[in-house]
Amino acid sequence: MAFGKGHHLHLIDGSAFIFRAYHALPPLTRKSDGLPVGAVSGFCNMLQKYVQDNHGPDAPTHVAVIFDKGSHTFRNEMYPEYKANREAMPEDLRPQIPLTRQATEAFNIACKEMEGYEADDIIATLSCRARDAGGRVTIISSDKDLMQLVGGGVEMFDAMKNNRIGVEGVEAKFGVGPERVVDVQALAGDSVDNVPGAPGIGVKTAALLINEFGDLETLLDRAEEIPQPKRRQTLLDNREQIELSKRLVQLDCETPLEFTLDDLEVREPDPERLMTFLAEMEFRTLTKRIAEALQVEPPAIPEPATQEAGEGPAPEWPGIDPDAYERISDMKALDSWIRLIRHQGYVAVDTETTSLNEMQADLVGICLAIQPGQACYIPLGHKDGSADDLFGSDALLEGQLPLQDVLDALKPVLEDEAILKIGQNMKYDAKVLARYGLTVAPFDDTMLMSYALYSGVHGHGMDTLSERYLNHTPIPIKDLLGTGKSAITFDKVAIDDAVKYAAEDADITLRLWLTFKPQLHRHQATTVYETLERPLSPVLAQMERHGIKVDREVLSRMSNAFAQKMAGLEAEIHELAGRSFNVGSPKQLGEILFDEMGLEGGKKGKTGAYATGADVLEDLATEHELPARVLDWRQLSKLKSTYTDALQDHIDPDTGRVHTSYVQTGANTGRLASTDPNLQNIPVRTEEGRRIREAFIAEPGNTLVSLDYSQIELRILAHIADLPALKQAFREGQDIHAMTASEMFDVPMDDMTPEIRRRAKAINFGVIYGISGFGLARNLRIPRAEAQAFIDRYFERFPGIRAYMDNTVAFAKEHGYVQTLFGRRIHTPEIAAKGPRAGFAKRAAINAPIQGTAADIIRRAMIRMPDAIADQPAKMLLQVHDELIFEVEAGAEDALIDAARSVMEGAADPAVKLDVPLVVDAGQGSNWAEAH
DNA sequence: CCTGTCACG
DNA sequence: GACGTACGTGACAGGG
């Protein structure tokens, strides 16, 4: 039956798929010959997802992937500059283009292109024909140039955003219906395709004009009637250029096609052909996944003969097979493993426990791996998971070695200086084992290796690393434990299942270590790993185990006080609103403010809800009472729920202290992150919030001491950007913000006012963040032009800043990363992006060396600290980016401050000689509020 | 699970 | 020219 009513044609914009795949994925190469295949891999993934998502009731009857062919089209005949500003295709993408055609055919999807025509024209022609035949069309693309085709049964679908675009979608984008889109584009032009349009007219203005005059021809004929002189002149002067632009953007529905709609009928994939192609590309994970979907056996993909400098798994390794692992249930077997380990000199270690909280976690089993594929699991604390009576489940299962025997046997191995212990996030295992009296040293940590190598490229969790470097998806822990309320703990997992999961983790860890170890040198990350990452881990473990004492009574009293105040505020708010509603719901609050009370300035975000952030409410607060009350309520709600309530739940029942966890790989810049609870965001800026710090106390007879770096990031900026005036000021111990203000605004230091100083301070911080006129304007609440004038002035007075910013961005573009003074590399893959993402990436690149160098410095101090204060009755408890908090016996405060300060102030030495001094301020008291 | 909001450096 | 933008984090509540 010929294509017609009841049929549904899908047209996939192939080029868009390719470019999206290319930019979304790292530059993968085929292992056997180094052929770049990243884009092909992404392309196949997207096709696979497409096929999977489209076999329901609304499945297409016809489908084709449409590609561009050749760069010279009939549009270049009209206008030689058409698309002339396009950057050349990246070298490693070019060879992948024909492969994407092959991929499409392998999926048994029609694949169409025509010399001299753009994909858009083929799509247009097919859409028109299908529509005229009475069928439906979905164009899978988000390209705005295709929006003119929408309507009359033609829709678009943005596969990225999972978003259908119909007539309303087009109207939202262009302000006119699909039939007038070309008119708007003709006026607005298009910088991407180098369509000139009318100078000074954008989409908004163009839509306004078209809506007023009906269409482009009428508008051009009656241009004299336009009231605004500038616009009128532009249109009169550029008539020809506008008409040319329209011809350029108008898609051609008359492309002479050599095939018909009926040739595009959906065909079942031929599994063999598809598998053969995927195997040829050596896509291991994808081949497996698609084989599963098609319910066929995946073909074996031969490993290449030699392992070159590639980052993937070595060829001689056996596949990861959970059934191949050994379960240890007698001492003889354990002893023979220990002999193997001693002989080899290294072993991957992983512990299984009952909790993610190392302070609470009980050991359930230990696994060891010595070679890829050679791993064992020693079950120690497994209980009967099926027993549901309260008493039966406490009994240990049969066939497990006594915990103490195993620990005694392993202790000499774990503590042997000649045996390297390898872990993924070893801090966790070390903390658990420490509670059983075991030290783990020396060690390597694959998570930290990944971080030193690839910060900013990808995450550093085991699943990510395994998928990326071993092409293997580990058994999800969910499969064993379940999720949510019904989740069980690891001790209730059947031993046979535990062997597979746990030993696999050790196997993967060992393989990752074998992969990363040689890469450290190749990527010049050895020093960072050896001096900034590995030695910090045990220091953090120790700090976390100490914890900090928190007074539950203080928090509880504050919670009650907050609750009372909130109830009062809530009543007032409901009164002012005229009805009761959930004050904590931004959605309901927005409706109250802007719909019911009719306040001005309501702006809806992308979800369609009104924005009710603090900045919005602050503006409204000048006019009305309600938003001011809501702000007060929000502050209290935050303090109560996040701090006074939640912190109480984090007090360890055994120690009476709060034990945070530092994520060493948490921030791309080298900073730490603190979780469960986050002790790096305890309030300090408001009086009310600061009082929460009174709950953080020293043990009786002890004092809390806080030492923090003064202006460390600005000092680093002065050094890195080589700003003589700033460096001089720091050397002389001047008020740096006042100095900046004096320099910028020509005010003598003696006449400085707080307001002028405040502005200079905001600019100083802005520079660290990759300053923009917009950002500074918002921060200072001044007009943008004024903010920009400040910035210009700043650059004039401190020319080194401009140079630093430009050089840093250029470096990032050339190398794909920026680095700190200590050689830490922070990768900036987004720096090549187009659009708003480029701005983000630039500012992040400017900020990273500054924030990262500061992070490196305090890390160095922390690493040296335990030895420096070893003879003092003091413990380091917390780090808050530029601050260290200690607990010290009363009477020993000054000695501790002397020692710790000298470590901190000298932390850059001897690796880096800073042109500015580092200065550390100290405070002390019985609680954190006093000490800070 | 995502979004908005807000706490810190 | 238009558009959207300060850097880095984590936790909580609401809502689909």
Image (spheres, coloured by chain):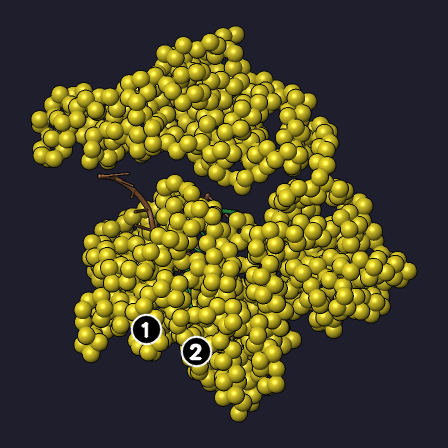
Chain colours: A yellow, B green, C brown
Specify few, some or many for label 2: CA neighbours under 10 Å numbering under 14, 14-19, or 20 or more. many
Q: Secondary structure at mark 2?
A: strand
Name the residue at 83% across, 67% down. A409
Cα gap from disc 2 to disc 1, whole angstroms: 18 Å
Q: Residue furthest top?
A: A1
Would you place residue A79 above or below residue A824 in this image?
above
Which of A461/A548 is in front? A461
Residue that label 2 marks: A920
Residue A854: image location, x then y, percent: 45, 66
Q: Which residue is mark 1?
A: A728
State the image coordinates of residue A873 (x, y, percent, origin top left): 59, 86
Q: Chain of mark 1?
A: A
Q: Are marks 2 and 1 on the same chain?
A: yes
Would you say C12 lies left or right of A218 here?
right
Q: Tell me which amino acid carries mark 2.
A: Val
Above or below, comparing residue A820 to residue A48 in the picture: below
